[in-house]
Amino acid sequence: MYFYAARQPILDKNKNLFAYELLFRDSIDNVFPEVDGDIATSKMIEASQFNLGISEFTGNKPAFINFTLETMSKGYPAMLTPDEVVVEILETVKPGKKLLALCKELFDNGYILALDDYEHQKVWQHFYPFIKIIKIDLHKTSFDEVKVIRQAISAYPHIQLLAEKVESYEQYNEAMEHGFELFQGFFFSKPEMVKSKNLSPSQVAMAELLYETSKPELDLASITSVFERDVSLSYKLLRYANSAIFRRRSEISTIKQALVILGSSELKRFIGLMFAVNVNPDKPSELINVSMTRAKFCELMANEAKTSVDISIAFLTGLLSMIDAILDEDLASILEKLPLAQEIKDTLLVGKGTLASLLRIVSFIEHAQWSEISEELTELGLNKDKVIQCYHDALVWADEQTVHVEG
């Protein structure tokens, strides 16, 4: 059984992945605030212990999980190790002696504690010695109020400020200027700046490969020649083909051999991943991870919808759904330069059809917008439990693949 949870990345000021927050819902049809906070946390802990496992869901990064006073009193944080969890104290919990004692006990046992949606009150100063992270919602708190908070915690240099709901690079940069060290939101999934530019030689080679592998019949000679012009690409192809995930009995030593052994579907997947990972190495790795998750999700769901979709097309469409953010360029301008199937371009630009619906569904899951999903599921004839299972499987797959294609 899969639990209904989305993971939202938390990045440091260098845009490296720091942790994930797990956002739980009882089901797609039962959405916060209707779910009691105690029940939500209890089910999250139960699911992580007996079903999926926190480390599998978060790629061995710490998981921020909300706790109420009641769930803290019952010792639920101790069901996870200090390396697995950041104990996030819900904003509805009032500061008091009982909470202070629980915080001290968790701190002494090595747990990291965070205050969620912090609203400044002087009474919280008693908690500062045990608090590592203070989360501030930028939609609710002005930067003038942030200055007051920074002054209040100035005697506690171990405390880090985390900016929530950072949706643009402007917000990210402004938050950094005001002393924030951690950032939660999807600013990284939007273009940092929109501009027109030419593709580099490496990007052109990738585009050629995307074009060649989009043909019904692969032209091995043409594909081999593209790889042979780029030493780095050749190395990565051979390394990927020889990786443990394929359990080969003998070593693959030539480009042509690697192409034949991988086969059409796996080759298309590899080239798509290579394009996403290498097209702009300066972008946050989590952006690539989200793109990979979308690709795998679309591939897994392609055969589940009423209208069947080619899985290779589905995979590549999901992968390229964030290409504007990866390249920091207008989507239409990018797609003009890439010789892709018209079905992919129509999906990404017009937003109509089965694949566009699948992209909307995965976007809703990423943002934990469960109430928005039902209409799309009904239209495609999809089972909600199957959708969640495919999303979780896609997350795990994407985390594993990153290791194989970035090296």
Image (cartoon, rainbow, N blue to C red):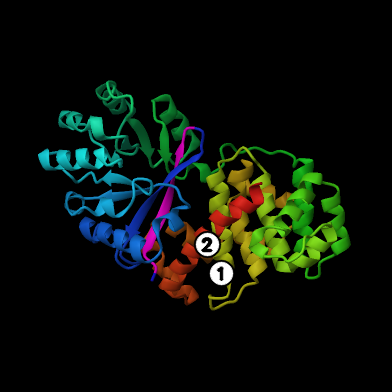
Taking 41 as reference, is 348 left or right?
Answer: right
Under mark 1, the amino acid is Leu
In the figure, residue 141 lies in which quadrant?
top left
Res. 144 mark: none
Q: Which amino acid type is marked by label 2?
A: Ala
Q: Residue, x 28% and y 62% (percent of image)?
A: 43
Q: In the rendered structure, does residue 263 fall within the stretch colored magenta?
A: no
Residue extending furthest front?
249
Question: Tag 1 or tag 2, which sits nearer the N-term?
Answer: 1
Q: Residue at x 26, y 24 (%)?
A: 148
Could you say which is closer to the camera, residue 142 or residue 219?
Answer: 219
Locate residue 91, reporting x and y percent: 23, 44
Magenta range is: 2-13
The quadrant of the picture occupied by the N terminus is: bottom left
Q: Secondary structure at mark 2?
A: helix
Viewer-proximal residue among 404 and 365: 404
Q: Position of residue 75 (x, y in %)?
A: 21, 52
| Magenta span main SS | strand
Q: Quadrant of residue 202?
A: top right
Residue sitting at x 26%, y 59%: 40
Q: Can residue 313 be seen by looking at this rendering?
A: yes
Total tally of numbered discs in the picture = 2
Q: Are marks 2 and 1 in contact (CB under 8 Å)?
A: yes
Q: Which residue is mark 1?
A: 300
Locate residue 334 relative to residue 145 in the image: left or right: right
Q: Is residue 8 on the magenta stretch?
A: yes
